[in-house]
Image (tube, helix red, strand yellow):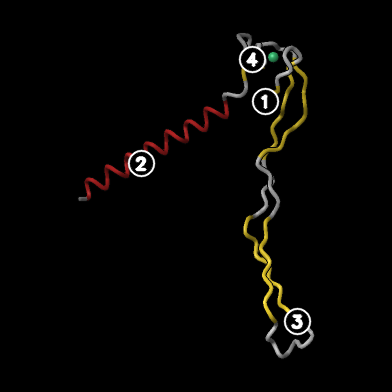
Amino acid sequence: MYVILMIIMVVGLIVLLEKLADIDSSNNGNTTYNEQGQKCCPYCGSTHFQYAGQQIYGARPEKTKTRYTANLNPLRPFTLVNKKEKVVKKARSGYAVDEFICLNCGNRFR
Ligand SMILES: [Zn+2]
């Protein structure tokens, strides 16, 4: 019984590692270099490109949930409702990526 569980765990681990490797290679595959080691356009291979500024990925504002409940506290007679705010999702600053525009074909790349 334990042997079967061990095999399932090992297989699951291998699949997970392969997925992680896929994510890594897809991130690196965006920047293309030519034979001279210069950064170039991934479509036409031209080294004539312009800096297009920084693009921010993965940023999101804080998401909160607000709940109102009737005030039952006799020591606070002028408060009608109690307001409770709960952070559902924390804010993320994201990460900045330099983007370039190819002057040959107009392609945007990192
Ligand atoms: Zn190009």
Q: Residue at x 63, y 9 (%)?
A: 36
Query: Going from the N terminus, do you reach mark 4 or mark 1 first?
Result: 4
Image coordinates of residue 49 in percent, x first then y, are 75, 16
Question: Looking at numbered disc 2 in the image, what kind of residue is underneath it?
Answer: Gly
Question: Looking at numbered disc 4 in the image, what kind of residue is underneath it?
Answer: Tyr
Q: Is mark 4 within 8 Å of ligand 1?
A: yes
Query: Going from the N terminus, do you reach mark 3 or mark 1 first?
Result: 3
Q: Residue at x 22, y 46 (%)?
A: 3
Question: Looking at numbered disc 1 in the image, what kind of residue is underneath it?
Answer: Arg
Question: Looking at numbered disc 3 in the image, what kind of residue is underneath it?
Answer: Leu
In front: label 3 or label 1: 3
Q: Which numbered marker is on residue 80?
A: 3
Residue under numbered circle 4: 43
Q: CA distance from mark 2 to mark 3?
A: 54 Å
Residue under numbered circle 2: 12
> Few, some or many C-alpha atoms within 10 Å of disc 4 (few <14, some 14-19, many ≥20)?
some
The local secondary structure at tag 2 comes to helix
Q: Is mark 1 within 8 Å of ligand 1?
A: no
The local secondary structure at tag 1 comes to loop
Residue under numbered circle 1: 110
Q: Residue at x 72, y 27 (%)?
A: 99
Query: Going from the N terminus, do you reach mark 4 or mark 3 first?
Result: 4
> Few, some or many C-alpha atoms within 10 Å of disc 3 (few <14, some 14-19, many ≥20)?
few
> Few, some or many C-alpha atoms within 10 Å of disc 2 (few <14, some 14-19, many ≥20)?
few
Q: CA distance from mark 4 to mark 1?
A: 12 Å
The local secondary structure at tag 4 comes to loop
The residue sitting at the top extreme is: 35
Where is ligand 1, by quadrant? top right
